[in-house]
Image: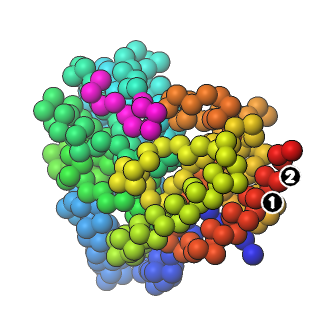
C-alpha cells in the first residue's frame, strides 16, 4: 500500500472535480459562439468563474483563467515589466523558479534587483523595500517550509508607494486562508493541480484597473488578457475543486496540525540530531507542511529509500547534471549546506490519515536503522 505525502508537489484529482470534468465534456461548444451549444459552454464558463472568484475573494471579472501557476506568474510579471517606469524589482530567493527565472532575465537586461533577506524561520524582511522598485513579487506561503509571508503588510506598503505587487498564492490556497482583498496585491496566481483540479488549469487574479498584456495572442477571450479558446471542462473542474477546498479548509487545517505535531515529535525521537525548519508557531505556517533536516544524511538518499518502503515524500535538494545541490530556500534561511542537503519535505492533503503518518514513521525508522550505524 502506497503512502503519498508530497501534496505540495501535486494533489490527486478530487472526486468533485472529476465529476465536473466529465459532465463538462458534454458541453463541447465554443464559448465564443452565439448558437445554443456555444451559449451553454459560455454559461458553464461564467458560472465557474464566479466559483473561482468566490474562492479567491474577488469579483468574477478579475479572474483570468490560465494553465497554472507558472503561466500566471509569468503573465503578471511580464505585464508589469512592460509598463514599469522604474526598472527595479524586489523579491527574495524563496520564490518559485517561475518567478525567479523571469526576474533574473529582467536583471540580466539591466533591471536592478533588490533581493530581500530572509529570517531563520523563512520569513522575508519586507522592511527592506527602498520605494524605488517598479515591481514587488512575494509568495503567500513557501513551498518547502510552509512559512507564511507578510503579504497584508506588504500590500499596504506597496499601495502607499504605488508599486505593483504580484503575489504567488499557489501553495497557500486551499491550505490556509487567503483573500486577495486582504492581501492588497495587484495580481495573484492560483494553480489547479495543487488543490485537486486537473493539471493544466489555473487562474490569475487581476485587480480592477490593473492592465495586463497577454502572453498568448489570438483572440479576445478572457477580456483580451489571454487569447485562445477556453478549456471549459478543465475550468469547470477547477471551480469544483475550489468549492470543495473552501468548504473543508477548517477541518483540513485542524487534522494536519495534529499530524504535524505527531510527526515532528516522533522524528526527533528517532533521530535526535534532526531539526524542524520553518516557523514554530502554527499560525505562521501552512498546517500541512513539515520540513526536516537530517544532518549526516542526504535527502537524495532518504527519498528513494522511503519510496522503496512505499512512502512518497520530497527532498529540499535538487539534482542537476548528476550533481545534488542544496535547497536555495534553506540556504537563504541561513542553514548550512549539510542541513540543506539533508532535508525532507513531508506535505499532507485532504485524504491524509493517522494511518498514513504511522506508516511514514515506521518506514522512516526502518530507513534510518539501515543508514545510521
Left or right: 4 with respect to 218?
Answer: right
Image position, residue 216 (x, y; %): 41, 47
Q: How is the image coloured?
A: rainbow
Residue at 51% from the left image edge and 55% from the top image edge: 289
Q: Can residue 197 be seen by looking at this rendering?
A: no
Tell me: 161 left or right of 91: left
Identify the secondary structure beneath mark 1. Answer: helix
Q: Look at 57% across and 75% down and name the residue there.
A: 353
Rendering quarter of residue 88: top left
Looking at this view, name the residue that lies furthest to the left: 160
* Residue 61 in picture, x, y percent from top left: 21, 60
Q: Neighbour class for label 1 at 10 Å: few (<14), some, many (≥20)? A: some
Magenta range is: 118-128
Which residue is disc 1 drawn over?
366
Per the image, the residue denoted by label 2 is 370
Coordinates of residue 129 in the picture (x, y in percent): 27, 24
Q: Residue at x 22, y 60 (%)?
A: 58
Residue contact between numbered discs 1 and 2, judged by CB atoms under 8 Å: yes
The residue depicted at 43 percent of the width and 45 percent of the height is: 279
Q: Secondary structure at mark 2?
A: helix
Kindly identify which numbered label has been placed on residue 24: none
**What separation in Å lies between label 1 and label 2 (alpha carbons)?**
7 Å
Label tally: 2
Q: Is residue 139 magenta?
A: no
Question: Of helix, strand and loop, which mostly describes the magenta segment?
Answer: loop
Magenta stretch holds residue 124: yes
Amino acid at each position: 500500500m502506497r503512502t503519498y505525502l508530497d501534496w505540495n508537489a501535486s494533489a490527486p484529482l478530487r472526486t468533485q472535480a472529476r465529476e465536473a470534468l466529465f459532465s463538462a465534456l458534454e458541453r463541447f461548444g465554443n464559448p465564443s459562439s452565439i448558437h445554443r451549444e456555444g451559449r451553454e459552454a459560455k454559461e458553464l464558463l461564467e458560472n465557474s468563474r464566479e466559483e473561482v472568484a468566490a474562492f479567491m475573494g474577488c469579483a468574477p471579472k478579475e479572474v483570468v483563467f490560465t494553465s497554472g501557476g507558472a503561466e500566471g506568474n509569468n503573465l503578471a510579471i511580464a505585464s508589469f515589466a512592460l509598463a514599469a517606469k522604474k526598472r527595479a524589482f524586489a523579491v527574495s530567493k524563496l520564490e518559485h523558479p517561475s518567478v525567479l527565472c523571469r526576474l533574473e532575465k529582467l536583471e540580466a537586461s539591466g533591471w536592478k534587483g533588490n533581493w530581500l533577506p530572509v529570517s531563520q524561520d523563512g520569513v522575508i524582511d519586507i522592511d527592506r523595500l527602498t520605494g524605488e522598485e517598479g515591481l514587488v513579487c512575494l509568495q503567500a506561503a513557501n513551498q518547502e517550509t510552509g512559512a507564511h509571508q507578510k503579504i497584508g503588510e506588504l500590500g499596504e506598503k506597496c499601495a502607499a508607494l504605488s508599486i505593483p505587487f504580484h503575489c504567488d498564492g499557489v501553495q497557500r490556497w486551499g491550505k490556509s486562508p487567503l483573500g486577495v482583498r486582504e492581501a492588497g496585491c495587484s495580481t495573484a496566481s492560483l494553480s489547479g493541480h495543487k488543490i485537486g483540479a486537473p493539471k493544466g488549469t489555473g487562474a490569475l487574479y487581476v485587480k480592477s484597473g490593473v492592465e495586463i498584456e497577454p502572453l498568448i495572442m489570438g483572440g479576445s477571450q478572457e477580456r483580451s488578457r489571454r487569447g485562445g479558446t477556453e478549456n471549459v471542462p478543465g475550468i469547470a473542474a477547477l471551480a469544483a475543486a475550489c468549492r470543495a477546498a473552501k468548504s473543508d479548509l477548517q477541518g483540513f487545517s485542524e487534522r494536519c496540525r495534529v499530524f504535524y505535531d505527531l510527526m515532528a515529535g516522533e522524528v526527533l525521537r528517532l533521530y535526535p540530531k534532526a531539526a524542524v525548519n520553518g516557523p514554530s508557531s502554527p499560525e505562521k505556517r501552512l498546517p500541512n507542511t513539515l520540513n526536516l533536516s537530517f544532518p549526516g544524511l542526504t535527502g537524495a538518499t532518504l527519498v528513494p529509500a522511503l519510496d522503496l518502503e512505499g512512502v512518497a515524500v520530497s527532498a529540499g535538494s535538487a539534482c542537476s547534471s548528476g550533481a545534488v545541490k542544496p535547497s536555495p530556500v534553506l540556504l537563504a534561511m541561513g542553514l548550512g549546506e549539510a542541513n540543506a542537503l539533508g532535508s525532507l519535505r513531508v506535505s499532507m492533503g485532504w485524504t491524509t490519515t493517522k494511518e498514513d503518518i504511522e506508516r511514514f514513521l515506521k518506514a522512516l525508522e526502518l530507513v534510518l536503522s539501515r543508514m545510521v550505524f
